[in-house]
Amino acid sequence: MLPNDETLFDKVVNLSKRRGFVFQSAEIYGGFRSTYDYGPLGVLLLRNVKEQWWRSMVQLRHDVVGLDASILSPPAVWQASGHLANFSDPMVDCRECGARHRQDKLDDPNACPSCGKSGSLTEAREFNLMFKTHAGPMVESAAEVYLRPETAQGMFVNFANVLNTSRKKPPFGIAQIGKSFRNEITPGNFVFRTREFEQMEMEFFVPPEDSDEWYHYWCGARMDWYLDLGMPEDRLRLREHDADELSHYSTGTSDVEFAFPWGWDELEGIANRTDFDLKRHAESSGTKLEYHDPASGERYVPHVIEPAAGATRTAMAFLMAAYDEEEVNDDVRTVLRLDHRLAPYKVAVLPLSKKPELIEPSNEVLGLLQPHWMCDYDQTQAIGRRYRRQDEIGTPYCVTIDFDTLEDRAVTVRDRDSMTQERVPIDGLVDHMAGRLPA
Ligand code: ATP
């Protein structure tokens, strides 16, 4: 049984705090609004989401390489990319209650969503979303730098470096995972929209005449990634932008959207960015950013297909998709049905009691499993409650060491989803789990 959508949001936020997925940042000082810290479980989930993205976008391909570019960058980069002039949202203030809103996200552009007052909103003003700071000890305009609002520009400014060092030629891509910063006017919906977040972006450089074909290819490939990791088909959709939504340089953009409790919203944008970025950086920097085919002698500026996803936002969507409650023996069991690859812990090792004679074999079992998978270890409380704790954080398997273990050197392996249990010899445990868990 899935909770209805109104309660799902609160339940997931509550579980995230209670079990250590996500904490409010600087909580002991009253909390720093719209920034979050990923706790012991959240950091594992987030790492797994990023790892799965990297695996599919870089490791399993011969035509994509990785990059880790700097977060701080000089104004010249953002001047060329257009962010200094255009990376802004229309902001309105309510004259009645003082609340500040993003005009393009209002259901009713004439009424304040905070106090409901009609006609109280100011004219919209463009607000640039980039965070500015100063490099070095002098607070002067010559020292101004920006925290990147997207990872993508790192790939464009390194295009020639990568081309010259990696022996790749179009079609090829550069992928990057990292933090981005946007001074959002209205952050909210938990980690959905924050001022500091992580992105997973890839710029795929192609011959101009092939760009439409590659755009459609990446739309399909990216949808498949979410579905393969267990997103239910009916909660995921690809929405093509209308012509009036498209950036002036884009010939096609589609969003991967997830059915959040508040409605369909974006997880990822896939855009055909044409040759806009490379041309802008070539003009501004005076560096040639093009491909020269030595065989044909042909020279051209590649077009770019960009799948740009949010890691933190996607991790939250996976949590929401995985959250389930079911009735078991007149009780409600909460279970995160996360794909095994995403689950923070793959196995929990649980001695039936704290008796010293069970701790020794439990440590042995833990030592066998830990080199292969992220394991939890818990020896407190009744075993039934410990199973429920593991269900609630999505651990696919619990391994219990009991007094029979001392006789038969076997343990009980319990499956999170079916709750079935089977007896497995310690000596064959790693092989047994290897048949069920990702390497
Ligand atoms: P939105 O319309 O939601 O503001 P966007 O279209 O500006 O997003 P992009 O610039 O395409 O977003 O960024 C790519 C991805 O980065 C988004 O699909 C989203 O998953 C993630 N992202 C963007 N802004 C934020 C944010 N403030 N907090 C968390 N994730 C974000």
Image (tube, rainbow, N blue to C red):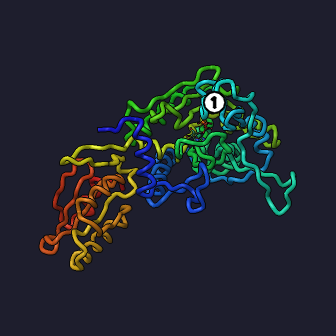
21 horizontally vs 113: left or right? left
Q: Quadrant of residue 323?
A: top left
Task: Decide if residue 91 is in sight here.
Answer: no
Point 16% across, 61% down: residue: 423
Q: Secondary structure at mark 1?
A: loop
Residue 21, position in %: x, y? 45, 55
Q: Is residue 430 visible in the rendered structure shown here? A: yes
Question: Total of numbered circles in the picture?
Answer: 1
Which residue is at 35% across, 63% downward? 375
Is the residue marked 1 within 8 Å of ligand 1, measured from its CB?
A: no
Q: Nearer the viewer, residue 73 or 337?
A: 337
Q: Position of residue 88 (x, y in %)?
A: 72, 36
Where residue 5 sits, quadrant-wise, is top left
Query: Which quadrant of the rendered structure holds the N terminus?
Result: top left
Report the residue marked by disc 1: 112
* Type of amino acid at the residue the image marks with label 1: Cys
Q: Quadrant of ligand 1?
A: top right
Screen quadrant of the C terminus: bottom left
Q: Nearer the viewer, residue 369 or 170?
A: 369
113, above or below 372, in the image: above
Q: Seen in the image, is 193 located left or right of residue 399? A: right
**Number of other residues with Cα within 10 Å of mark 1, as a class: few under 14, some 14 to 19, many 20 or more:** many
Residue 54 lies, in percent from the top left, at 50, 49
Q: Residue at x 24, y 64 (%)?
A: 382
Residue 94: x percent and y percent? Answer: 69, 33
Residue reaching furthest to the bottom: 356
268 sits left or right of 324 in the view? right
